[in-house]
Image (cartoon, helix red, strand yellow):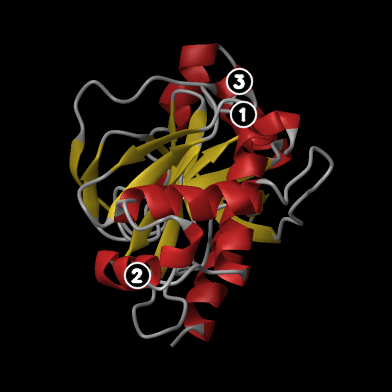
Amino acid sequence: MSHCFTEVIMKPLGDSALIVQLGEGISPSIHQKVQALSMLLNTYPFDGFIESVPAFNNITIHYDPVLVHHTQLNNLANNQSSLTSFQIVCSNINELIQQIDDTQKVEARLVEIPVLYGGEYGPDLDDVAAYHKISPEDVIRIHTQSDCLVYMLGFAPGFPFMGGMDERISTPRRETPRLSIAPGSVGIAGKQTGVYPLETPGGWQIIGRTPLDLFRPDLSPPTLLQAGDKIKFVQISPEEYHSYKEMKR
């Protein structure tokens, strides 16, 4: 077993899911473990496995307890007759963890996200610049130079929570959240940056907007991004923004 998995904690989440905690805090190294386990679960699913949902430092695994119990009955010869579905799933996960070593890396997909910064599309850009006593152009430069990592999707369908943003533009959330934020809005909240896929309320500092659709329920998969993706923000002009919009029609 890899020494990098000495901190594994498994906790039940109801009777048909469990959370596998792979470390504390938020870091690329811990998330690499999350991605490695998620990849193995999808490549070698155990009987009763439904899906895995990766997050910052853990992964939620959903399963069918009836199918897991059926597997238990078929394994009476292996002295598993008294195990609960949760214990059997934990055993299956431990077997997968045994296959992971410290050098194993999951190759990340690089996704470029075009952004029109400032103006009506980034109403908080000037406030972010003033907070750090730099120019709006400096905020844009720093934001586009950051190599960001999608740690998880949540809050709204397809909303990417990203780490890796340069801390020089780390900015607190707005004191008064907005009741409505336009789809595609690019925001900053603390050390994180993210993109609103749908029109929702929100308190992030909005510095720009992308013309890309992050959530399309008519597609498979419906989300543009996924946990483990590396993101590069690219500044575009108003003309380029509207050109993207026209191409989607």
Q: CA distance from mark 2 to mark 3?
A: 53 Å
Q: Nearer the viewer, mark 2 or mark 1?
A: 2
Task: Give the residue displayed 55% in from the left and 11% down from the top.
Answer: 133
| Relative side of 19 to 232, left or right | left
Instruction: Name the residue carrying label 1.
Output: 27
Residue 34, image x and y in percent?
Answer: 58, 45
For marks 2 and 1 on the same chain, the one whose residue lies earlier in the sequence? 1
Q: Secondary structure at mark 1?
A: loop
Give the image location of residue 126, x and y in percent. 46, 28
Disc 2 from disc 1: Cα separation: 40 Å
Amino acid at dot 3: Glu
Q: Which residue is mark 3?
A: 167
The residue indicated by pointer 2 is: 73
From the top left corner, tell me how far across and down residue 241 is, in percent: 54, 66
The type of residue carrying mark 1 is Ser
Q: Is residue 185 visible?
A: no
